[in-house]
Structures are given as C-alpha cells and as structure tokens.
Image: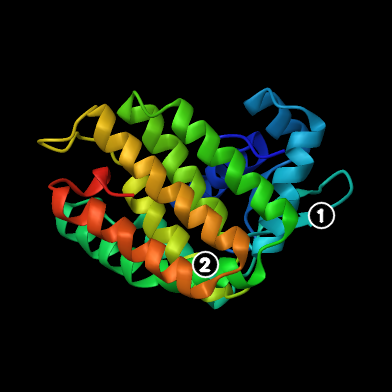
Amino acid sequence: MFSVPQTRAQSLATEIERWIVERELAPGSRIATMDELREQTGLGRATISEATRLLAERGTVDVKLGRSGGLFVAQPAAVVRLRHTLLSVSQDPARVRDALAVRDALEELIDVDAALHRTDRDVRDLESIVTTMREQSSTRSDFLQANWALHRRIAEITPNELARDVYLGTMAQVESLPGRPDADTADDAAYLSARVDIHAELVAAIAAGDALRTSRAVGAHRALTSPKVEAAPSRA
C-alpha cells in the first residue's frame, strides 16, 4: 500500500496542509467540499476520503456533513500549530541549517522508537522502500525521493506525537527546496550505493527490534553523510 515517495492520499493531505498555511486560513475556515476536491485534483473518492481521514487524525481539519459541509480548518492543538509553523518558515540557508540540526538531533530518538514499536506491516513498508532506493541508486534525484520516503515512514511509527511532528516539519523544510549535488559525490554510483547499504542496515536493525543496533546504524548514517554535505538539501 505504501508507494514512493508518498501515497496519493498522503500527498494530498500534505498539499491541503500547505493550502491552509499559504492562504492563512483561520480555524473554522472552509477549505473545500469533497466534490470540489475531486474536481480540483482529479482524484477518486477513496483517495479523497483517505486524505481526509489522515488530516482529521492529525487534528488539521474538521469534517462536516450535509449540503453546507466539507473540510474546515480545525482549532489546532499545540503540535499542529508547531508543524504548520515549521512548514511556513522562510526558506533561507540559516533556517534550513537550523531545521537540519533539529532533525538530526531527533533522528536517534525517532529511529530507536521505530525499533521498539514497529509492526510487521511497518517492516514490510520499510523493506519495500529500501528495495526502491536500491533500484534508483544510479540517479541522485530519484534516490533522494526514496530516501525522504523512508525517513518519513520510519517517523510515522513513533508514538511520540511531538517528536514526530517536529521531525516531519523540519524534513518538509528541506524537501521543498531544489536539490543541489554534493561537490564530490553527485550521481556517484559508489557513494549512493553505500548510502543504500547504510539505510538497509538501519531498516534491518529496526525490523529486528534491536535498539542498540539501531543507534549504531544512525551513527553510521551520520558518519557517511555529514562530512560530505555542503548544501542543506543534499542531506537525508
């Protein structure tokens, strides 16, 4: 069920969250009806319904039935306000570096939580994305899309709602920027292959439920990526 980089429903949910931020919609503001969403996106009823469910679970929207119903901006909880703030931060280099620092600080917590709370379904999804990463490791842009998808999917496992929302919000800051190759590793097949191996070990550690092995995999990930990064968007 999990496609790379996101399912259509997940992509639509993210897009609707951006509409709320960009249009500066206040709590209680009407976003759209289900029919309007279908007309605007060309997506089917099942996809619209799934995206709506995701948004309702996040506390982003309220769904009202009837002729005057549709999706309305919810009164946000603290974590939702924080996520929206992160999504709307100005995309200047200093802010991107700050976002990366926060994301990196949360990486071990997120990944170890995943090892402790993963389900069989989570493991299947993660292993599927690693397979896609390996298939796409000859092209940096395609590799990064799969890379982002893997980190998002790992973050979805943690029961720590605050950590998850902050982590995903900082990722959104970086993902939205155009990627620029590292000076000495752009489309370097050996380097990208090594990154796939690092992520494969991370997923194997999570699948095994081994917190210590997961921590070591996070450390190996940092050791491989951090020294080579010159532009923020090329880290993942």
Residue under pointer 2: 164
Q: What element carries label 2?
A: helix
Q: Which amino acid does label 1 sit on?
A: Lys
Quadrant in the picture for the N terminus: top right
Determine if residue 176 is in view: no
Q: Which of 50 and 19 is in front in this view?
A: 50
Q: Position of residue 32 (x, y in %)?
A: 68, 42
Q: Residue at x 38, y 67 (%)?
A: 216
Vertical order, 28 against 187 (above or below): below
Please give left or right for residue 126 compared with residue 189 in the image: right
Q: Which residue is drawn at 73% across and 52% down?
A: 121
Residue 75, quarter of the rendered image: bottom right
Please give left or right for residue 165 compared with residue 187 in the image: right
Q: Residue at x 53, y 61 (%)?
A: 205
Q: What residue type is labelled 2?
A: Arg
Question: How busy is the neighbourhood of tag 2: few (under 14 within 10 Å), some, or many (20 plus)?
Answer: many
Vertical order, 143 against 139 (above or below): below
Q: Residue at x 69, y 34 (%)?
A: 37
Question: How busy is the neighbourhood of tag 1: few (under 14 within 10 Å), some, or many (20 plus)?
Answer: few
Q: Nearer the viewer, residue 176 or 228?
A: 228
Q: Nearer the viewer, residue 185 or 7?
A: 185
Q: Position of residue 40 (x, y in %)?
A: 64, 27
Q: Where is residue 116 in the image (x, y as percent from the top left)?
A: 62, 73
Residue under pointer 1: 64
State the mark number for residue 120. none
Please give left or right for residue 109 compared with residue 188 in the image: right
Determine if residue 121 is in view: yes
Q: Nearer the viewer, residue 138 or 86?
A: 138
**Going by the picture, which residue comes out furthest to the right?**
66
Please give left or right for residue 177 compared with residue 7 in the image: left
Vertical order, 81 against 90 (above or below): below
